[in-house]
Every structure is written in structure tokens, then in C-alpha cells.
Image (cartoon, coloured by chain):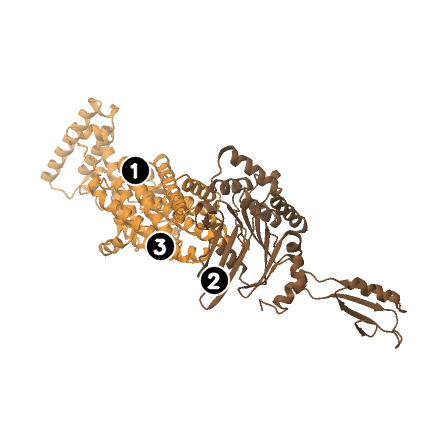
Chain colours: A brown, B orange
């Protein structure tokens, strides 16, 4: 029995012809949680997301968003916000017009609409460009507006599908801060990305997905503990040590590599030995290593 | 309903900001109407003017007067050259339609047609390309008309008439090949003409403010104005071309909004709309309402230009209020079908024209229905273009009754509902 959450998906399955895109996955996302969905291209992330928001009908399984239930119900949809990977904004409208339009179709009007449009412009850092058409914006500005349009109606659940693709570091940082602000306001976030540092920074829990299946779910620390492997200490010696010197790990010429779950103890041991070290590097296990460990290093788009 | 209006207003705003769409929906139909209206003879400038050149080898008062009268014709642009060679070259190179050479024997005497001077009179050589048979016929007619207008002038001017009579009497006196009886008869005729001219002069006929011809013919010819019966016929070519232009404007709207529906899908905004608290029929309804409104607005705009700028008369504004919405609704249905014939904007745009062009060719979008051969008119029954044009023309110049308009209007509405339903079903299947 799965724990009850704001979003509960059970046995989601979807095939396109012969290709099984999603193979019976279960997901539970708690209220106010930021949940990351990681996976290489073609892993089934987008298909899963489209089923979660009701844009695709699953072949089998169900999605329930509490309270309310069926994701195809307009009252449930009113509490969802979607920032698709493709820029889902109108290039020939201004930022203000885009925000107002998406606010209106979610039922906002009058003063409330004006307030939320102003909020959206502030949120996306586009107040000074509010009356410029979107087709005059940079890629980063469009990405920020894409996110603001998804959040203009104050959704309880916000889905962000790779919201930082192709943006400059400043815009990326702005998007991070915006998402952290939404998170602080209690918004439940479902976040997909290829960038591990984004998931590490923003997500409370992460699911790694490949070949239409969820391979692992947990907090970043839990995943690293379970799938990250050992830390690695790499030391470069100034000269080959005496044969009598007992070194941990593997020595190749003057390069020493030690894999351990207690890297700092290893560094202490090296300091006590009669060797001179020219450089020292410590690699802790991280999410990227978890990701590559679970999904492999083989290219997926070749 | 407010959601559908919100969606439609967004689409209309996008439409007005798309220059290419505005060109196809507004500028192109307008140019179409203006161009073909002018070609069919509705131009405001001089039309049907034939450029000719004249060589005046006679160089007499009569010949100069003839050339002057010829130049006053609205149908001719006349200039003169010195040599026949030069005139011949101008015609051969196509610079002029024809040349007229007035030989030294040229005369426009009243009596030139009545015997004695026949060999010497109206010696005019007309040089014209044999391929231009229509122009040749028209030109002969215009030259003859000009000659007769000169004679009429002589008849109606007693002094000129007297001079002619005196001249002819002198010629008669000198004639040696006539027997006395013939001489006497002709002498009596000329005397009678002389007396008539004197009495006309005395009565002040030539001082009249009226035109001489009118004075001479008044009482002899009773004129009666008979207005042409124009019921069911176009008053100007623009009445035909503007009806077609309105339908082309509707086509422009249909293709634009069909492409915009595909663009929504490819851009991702459709995903946002589909995950919003909207029903699919509302999304499609908004697109349909925008297409219908744009079509109707553009129809009114084109018609306003036609009425205000080119004198297009609307026979029945009331029927037009029925015809235009029905035509706009039909093309909204066509738009819906067009939007599902491809998965990309380019595919839909290309496919749309593949659908539209045969419809236009058959249905009167290119060849006016009034000019179609009967077999083509029969074939045009399968094209929605025909019914849209027929309904609009019916209100503008065909003088249809409401009952007569009912057939095309019913077909248009039927197509609107049927095609829209087909489009919606295919759209839902695609999603």
C-alpha cells in the first residue's frame, strides 16, 4: 500500500505502437514536496508527466490528485500549473498579454488578475519589458515568462519540464530562486531535468527513470548512500615510495587511488606515512554518479 | 462563453499582428478585386483608347478640321507625323494600332457622297495590322462618324452650305458632258438648297445657342430615352470582383487560422490549453469564433472599400447581412478541416492551398460565374466557393429574392456545420 500523497499515480502504462514508453510505474508526491524526475532522453519522463497532467490517457493505471480526484476534471486542473519544455507562450503577444491570457483561462479576472499579472512580471523579472512582444526577448527571458505563465493562477501543483534548458547562468539562477520562492509558499513541484546540480539543489526527493521504469526513488542523500558507491581519494606522489612503505589503495607509478567509505581517515593515514604528496583530490559520491551508475554511460541518442 | 471569447480575442490579436496573414486575408483580395475589376473595364482612367497616327497629305482646311475632330474622339489618341514611312514603322513596331493617311484628294464636302466628286472625296488610307480585326472595324466606324460629323456641320451652318451650293453651281455651269435637261434639274435643286440655306440663315439658326445638329433635327427626329434594364446584371465589374475578393478574404482567414491551430500544437501552447480547466470544444470554439469574426470583419472592410472607393452598389443590404455570415461560417468549417490535414504548419499551409485552389478554380474564384461555360457552371456545384459567391452576388447585384437566396445560404450553413464537425472529430482523434 502506497502512502497517500497529493499526487498518486499507480501502475501507469503507456505504449506508442510497439514501443513501451512507460511500464507500470507508481509515484506518490506529497503536498509541498519538490519531486525531481531524472532520466536520460527517451526514458519516459515526458510521457509520465503528460499522463500526470491529463494530457495523455494512460493505457493502464490511474492518476489521482487530491482533493478532487480525476485529473481530467476542470476543477482539479484549475489547481495545476504546467511549464512545458517547449516555450508555451505566444511570441506575438507581450509578456503582460501572455500572463493576462493564461490568468483568464484559469478563471482570474478584475483586480485579482491585475495583481497576478504584476506578480508574474515581477516573478519573471520582466516588469520593465511588460509591453514588449515576446519575440523580442532573449531565450532566458522567454524561459522565465514560460514559468511565470504556469504559476500566474497560483497553482497548488506546478509541473516544470526542464525549465532551464538553454538559458544563461543569470537566468538559470533567477529560475532557481523563483522555484525556491514557490516552494517556500507551499507549492508542490514536479521537476524534470538533465542537470544533477539542479535536482540536488531544489528537490526533496528524486526518482531516476530509464526505459519506462523507475529505477530508484528517495532523497538525494538516500540515493547517494544506496547507489553512489565509495568515495575516491587520488594522490599524486613526488617520487615512487620505498618498497617497504605500506600504501592503501592502488599505486600506478606515482599515482595513488584509494576507494573508501571513510575518505578523511585515508587522508590522515597518508599524512602519517613517509611520502611526499604533490597533489591530493577527494571525490565524494554524488547524484551524477548515482545517475550514471543506474542508467549506464552508453549514449542514448546515437 | 466568456472563455470562448477570451480565446477568440487572443487569436484575433495574434491575427492582426501577423503581417503575412493580414496580407493574404486583406491586401491580396483587395488587389485581386482592383486588378480584375480594372481589367474587365472598370478602371477610372481612360479606357479603350486606341492610339493612331495621321499623315495629312491633303493639308487643307477640311483635312485639318477632320484631324481635329478625330482628335476630339474619346476613343482615339491621335497624333500626326510627316511621312507615310514613319507612320508605317510606328504601326509595324506596334507603337500605334493604325495609321490614317489623308491623300491630297481628300474632301469632306457634303456633296462628296452625291455623285460628281465621288472619285475625289474621302480619300483616306487606313493602315492596320490584319490581326487587329476588331480595332479595324471600330476604327472604320470612328472615321466614318467623324466624316459625317463634318458633313453635319456643313448642313447645319447656312453660310458653309451657301458656299458649297455656289461652288457646285459654278461646277455645273462649266460641265460640258451634261445635257440641258440634266443641267436644268440640278440647277433647280441647287437653287432650292440655296433658298433653304438663306431662310435658315435669316431665321438665325446658326446663332442659336443650341447645337446645330439639334436645331436641324429638332422636329424631324423624336428622341426617347430608354434606360437599360439592369435587373440581375452587374452595374460594374467591381460588383463581380469584390464578391470574389470577399471569398478570397475568407480563404485567407481560413488558411491563417488553420495554420495557427497547428502552431499551437507545435509550440506547446496547445498543451497548456489542454491542461487548463477548459473543454476541448471550448478551445476549438474559440478558434472557430476568431476565424468567423475575422472573416466577417474583413468582408465588411472589403465591401466598404468597394462601396466608398469604387462605387460598388449593394442591391440588398438585408440579404447581404444573411449571406456574409453564412459564407464566413462555411469557411470556418473549412478552416477546421484544413487544420487537421497535416501535423506541421508547413504541411497544413501547403495542404490548404491544395484544397483551396481547385475549389476556387471551379467555384468562380478565378473565372467569374457569369463568364463560365455551361459545363464549368455545372462542375462548380461541388465547390463551396460557388455558393459563397452566389450568395454574396445575390445580395449585391443578382437581385435575388430571399427565397432564391435560401438555397446557397442553406448549403453554406450545411457545409459549415458538417465540415466543422468533421474537423472536430479528426482533431480529437489526433489528440
| Labels 1 and 3 positioned on one and the same chain | yes
Q: Choose between A287 and B417: the one closer to the eye.
A: A287
Give the crowd class for mark 2: few <14, some 14-19, many >=20 residues within 10 Å: many
> Quick one: which residue is furthest to the front in this view?
A1
Tell me the residue that label 2 is attached to.
A13
* Local SS, label 2: strand
| Labels 2 and 3 positioned on one and the same chain | no
Circle nearer the viewer, 2 or 1: 2
Tell me the residue that label 3 is attached to.
B425
Mark 2 and mark 1: Cα distance apart in space:
54 Å
Tell me the residue that label 1 is attached to.
B321
- Asked whether the beta carbons under mark 2 and mark 1 sit within 8 Å of each other, the answer is no
- Subunit that carries the residue with mark 2: A
Q: Choose between A103 and B153: the one closer to the eye.
A: A103
Left-right relation of B362 to A211: left
Left-right relation of A219 to B259: right
Quarter of the image holding residue A246?
bottom right
Amino acid at each position: 500500500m502506497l502512502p497517500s500523497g497529493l499526487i498518486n499515480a499507480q501502475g501507469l502504462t503507456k505504449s506508442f505502437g510497439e514501443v513501451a514508453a512507460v511500464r507500470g510505474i507508481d509515484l506518490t508526491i506529497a503536498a509541498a514536496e519538490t519531486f525531481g524526475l531524472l532520466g536520460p532522453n527517451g526514458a519516459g519522463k515526458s510521457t509520465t508527466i503528460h499522463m500526470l497532467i491529463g494530457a495523455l490517457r494512460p493505457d493502464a493505471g490511474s492518476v489521482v490528485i487530491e482533493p478532487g480526484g480525476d485529473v481530467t476534471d476542470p476543477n482539479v486542473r484549475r489547481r495545476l500549473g504546467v511549464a512545458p519544455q517547449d516555450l508555451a507562450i505566444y511570441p506575438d503577444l507581450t509578456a503582460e498579454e501572455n500572463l493576462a491570457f493564461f490568468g483568464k483561462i484559469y478563471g482570474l479576472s478584475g483586480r485579482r488578475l491585475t495583481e497576478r499579472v504584476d506578480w508574474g512580471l515581477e516573478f519573471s523579472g520582466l516588469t520593465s519589458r511588460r509591453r514588449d512582444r515576446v519575440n523580442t526577448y532573449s531565450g532566458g527571458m522567454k524561459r522565465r515568462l514560460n514559468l511565470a505563465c504556469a504559476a500566474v493562477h497560483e497553482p497548488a501543483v506546478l509541473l516544470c519540464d526542464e525549465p532551464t534548458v538553454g538559458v544563461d547562468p543569470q537566468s538559470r539562477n533567477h529560475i532557481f530562486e523563483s522555484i525556491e520562492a514557490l516552494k517556500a509558499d507551499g507549492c508542490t513541484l514536479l521537476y524534470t531535468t538533465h542537470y544533477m546540480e539542479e535536482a540536488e539543489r531544489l528537490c526533496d526527493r528524486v526518482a531516476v527513470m530509464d526505459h519506462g521504469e523507475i529505477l530508484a526513488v528517495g532523497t538525494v542523500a538516500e540515493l547517494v548512500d544506496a547507489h553512489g558507491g565509495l568515495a575516491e581519494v587520488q594522490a599524486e606522489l613526488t617520487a615512487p615510495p620505498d618498497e617497504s612503505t605500506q600504501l592503501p589503495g592502488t599505486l600506478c607509478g606515482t599515482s595513488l587511488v584509494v576507494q573508501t567509505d571513510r575518505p578523511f581517515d585515508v587522508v590522515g593515514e597518508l599524512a602519517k606515512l613517509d611520502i611526499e604528496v604533490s597533489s591530493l583530490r577527494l571525490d565524494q559520491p554524488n547524484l551524477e554518479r548515482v545517475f550514471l551508475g543506474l542508467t549506464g554511460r552508453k549514449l542514448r541518442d546515437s | 462563453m466568456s472563455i470562448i471569447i477570451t480565446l477568440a480575442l487572443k487569436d484575433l490579436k495574434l491575427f492582426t499582428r501577423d503581417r503575412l496573414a493580414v496580407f493574404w486575408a486583406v491586401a491580396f483580395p483587395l488587389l485581386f478585386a482592383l486588378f480584375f475589376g480594372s481589367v474587365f473595364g472598370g478602371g477610372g482612367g481612360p479606357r479603350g483608347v486606341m492610339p493612331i497616327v495621321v499623315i495629312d497629305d491633303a493639308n487643307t482646311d477640311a483635312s485639318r478640321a477632320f484631324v481635329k475632330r478625330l482628335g476630339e474622339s474619346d476613343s482615339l489618341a491621335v497624333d500626326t507625323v510627316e511621312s507615310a514611312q514613319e507612320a508605317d514603322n510606328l504601326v509595324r513596331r506596334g507603337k500605334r494600332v493604325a495609321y490614317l493617311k489623308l491623300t491630297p484628294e481628300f474632301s469632306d464636302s457634303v456633296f462628296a457622297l452625291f455623285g460628281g466628286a465621288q472619285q475625289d472625296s474621302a480619300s483616306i488610307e487606313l493602315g492596320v495590322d490584319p490581326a487587329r480585326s476588331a480595332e479595324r472595324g471600330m476604327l472604320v466606324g470612328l472615321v466614318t462618324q467623324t466624316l459625317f460629323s463634318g458633313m453635319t456641320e456643313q448642313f447645319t451652318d447656312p453660310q458653309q452650305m451657301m458656299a458649297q451650293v455656289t461652288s457646285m453651281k459654278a461646277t455645273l455651269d462649266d460641265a460640258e458632258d451634261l445635257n440641258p435637261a440634266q443641267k436644268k434639274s440640278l440647277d433647280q435643286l441647287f437653287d432650292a438648297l440655296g433658298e433653304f440655306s438663306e431662310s435658315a440663315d435669316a431665321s438665325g439658326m446658326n446663332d442659336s445657342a443650341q447645337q446645330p445638329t439639334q436645331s436641324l433635327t429638332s422636329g424631324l427626329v423624336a428622341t426617347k430615352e430608354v434606360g437599360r434594364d439592369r435587373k440581375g446584371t452587374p452595374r460594374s465589374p467591381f460588383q463581380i470582383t469584390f464578391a470574389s475578393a470577399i471569398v478570397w478574404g475568407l480563404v485567407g482567414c481560413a488558411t491563417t487560422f488553420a495554420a495557427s491551430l497547428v502552431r499551437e500544437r507545435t509550440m506547446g501552447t496547445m498543451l497548456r490549453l489542454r491542461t487548463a480547466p477548459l473543454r476541448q470544444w471550448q478551445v476549438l470554439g474559440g478558434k472557430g469564433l476568431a476565424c468567423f469574426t475575422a472573416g466577417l470583419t474583413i468582408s465588411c472592410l472589403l465591401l466598404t472599400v468597394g462601396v466608398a472607393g469604387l462605387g460598388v452598389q449593394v442591391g440588398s443590404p438585408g440579404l447581404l447581412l444573411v449571406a456574409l455570415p453564412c459564407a464566413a461560417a462555411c469557411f470556418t468549417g473549412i478552416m477546421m478541416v484544413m487544420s487537421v490535414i497535416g501535423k506541421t504548419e508547413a504541411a497544413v499551409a501547403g495542404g490548404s492551398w491544395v484544397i483551396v485552389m481547385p475549389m476556387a478554380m471551379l467555384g468562380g474564384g478565378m473565372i467569374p460565374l457569369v463568364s463560365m461555360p455551361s459545363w464549368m457552371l455545372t462542375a462548380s456545384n461541388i465547390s463551396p466557393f460557388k455558393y459563397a459567391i452566389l450568395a454574396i452576388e445575390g445580395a449585391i447585384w443578382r437581385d435575388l429574392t430571399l427565397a432564391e437566396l435560401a438555397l446557397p445560404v442553406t448549403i453554406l450553413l450545411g457545409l459549415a456545420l458538417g465540415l466543422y464537425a468533421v474537423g472536430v472529430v479528426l482533431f480529437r482523434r489526433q489528440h
